[in-house]
Image: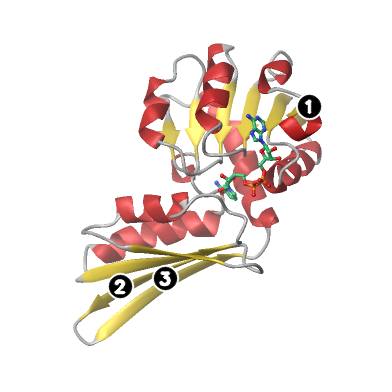
Amino acid sequence: MIKVAVAGAAGRMGQAVCEAVSGADDLELTGRADPALDVEVADVLGDADVLVDFTQPDQALDNARVAVEAGVHVVIGTSGFDVDRLSELRGANVLFCPNFAIGAVLMMQFAAEASRHMAKAEIIELHHDQKLDAPSGTAARTAGLMQGDVPIHSVRLPGLVAHQEVILGDVGQTLTIRHDSINRESFMPGVLLAIRKVGSLDRSPVIGLEHVL
Ligand SMILES: NC(=O)c1ccc[n+]([C@@H]2O[C@H](COP(=O)([O-])OP(=O)(O)OC[C@H]3O[C@@H](n4cnc5c(N)ncnc54)[C@H](O)[C@@H]3O)[C@@H](O)[C@H]2O)c1
C-alpha cells in the first residue's frame, strides 16, 4: 500500500484526488491538508509516503520543500509557480505534471513534432474563470517544447474546464491540434500513475507525465 496525503484537499482538484485515491486498491488516503479543513501540510506528513499538491501558485513550492525534507515524495499538479526553483529541493523525489490528462500529454508531443515542419504556431488555452494563473502551465510547457516563438492567448469563462488548441500555419494551410478535458475525472488516471511512480524515479525533479507513461 502506498500512503497518500493530499494538500488542497478541500479544493476542486483535491477533492477529486481524495476520491480517486480512496477508490484505488493499492493506495491509502492518510491525510487531507487544507486551511479550509484547519489541517497543515506538516501535520499529514508523518503518515505519508507521497504528498499530492493541488493548491495555489504561491504555496506549492513551500509545501513541496517541507515534504521532501521530511522524506515524503511529492506529486505537484499546481501550476503558475516558478518551475526552475524545483531544482533547489533536496530530499525525496519531486514529479511535477503541468497536465495529468493523457490526451493533453499527447497533444504536447504532437505539437512539438508539428512545429518542426510548419512555419508558425500560436496557442489558445481556455479555462474556467476561477483559475488563478494565465497562461496555463500546460500552454507554457507546450510552447517550451515547440520550435520558434509561440504566442499564447488565454480565455477565462464560466462553463469551461480545461481546453487547448495549437494552431500551426504554413503556405496555404493550417493544422489544429485540440484537447478538451470535459471534467476533472480526466486527470485522475494520470494522478494515480504519478503517485505510483514518483517513489522510483531515477532523478528529481522530473517534469511531465510523459516520463512515467
Ligand atoms: N496539473 C493538472 O493537470 C491540473 C489540472 C487542474 C488544475 N490544476 C491546478 O491545480 C491547482 C488547484 O486547482 P483547483 O481548481 O483545485 O483550485 P481550488 O482553489 O479549488 O483549490 C485549492 C485548494 O488549496 C487550498 N490551499 C491553499 N493553500 C494551501 C496550503 N498552503 N496547504 C494546503 N492547501 C492549501 C485552498 O484552501 C483550496 O481548498 C491550480 O494551480 C490549478 O491550475 C492542475
Which residue is located at x 78 percent, y 30 percent? 29
User: In the orientation shown, which residue stands out farthest toward the bottom?
Assistant: 172
Would you name the residue on which mark 2 appears? Answer: 168
Marker count (numbered): 3
The secondary element bearing badge 2 is classed as: strand
Question: CB under 8 Å between callouts 2 and 3?
Answer: yes
Residue 58 x %, y %: 52, 34
Residue type beneath disc 3: Ile
Which label sits in the foreground, 3 or 1?
1
The secondary element bearing badge 1 is classed as: loop
Which residue is located at x 40 percent, y 36 percent? 82
Which residue is located at x 49 percent, y 14 percent? 91
Figure quadrant of residue 4: top right
Residue type beneath disc 1: Asp
Which residue is located at x 57 percent, y 37 percent? 194
* Quadrant (top left/top right/bottom left/bottom right) for the N terminus: top right
Query: Which of the marked residues, 3 or 1, is nearer the chain's N terminus?
Result: 1
> Is residue 173 rendered to the left or right of residue 209?
left
On the rendering, which quadrant does ligand 1 occupy? top right
The image shows residue 112, relative to residue 72, as above or below, that is below
Numbered label attached to residue 38? 1
The secondary element bearing badge 3 is classed as: strand
The image shows residue 163, relative to residue 66, as above or below, that is below
Question: CB under 8 Å between callouts 3 and 1?
Answer: no
Residue 132 x %, y %: 55, 50
Numbered label attached to residue 177? 3
Cα separation between marks 2 and 3: 8 Å
Residue 198 x %, y %: 54, 29
Figure quadrant of residue 186: bottom right
Residue type beneath disc 2: Leu
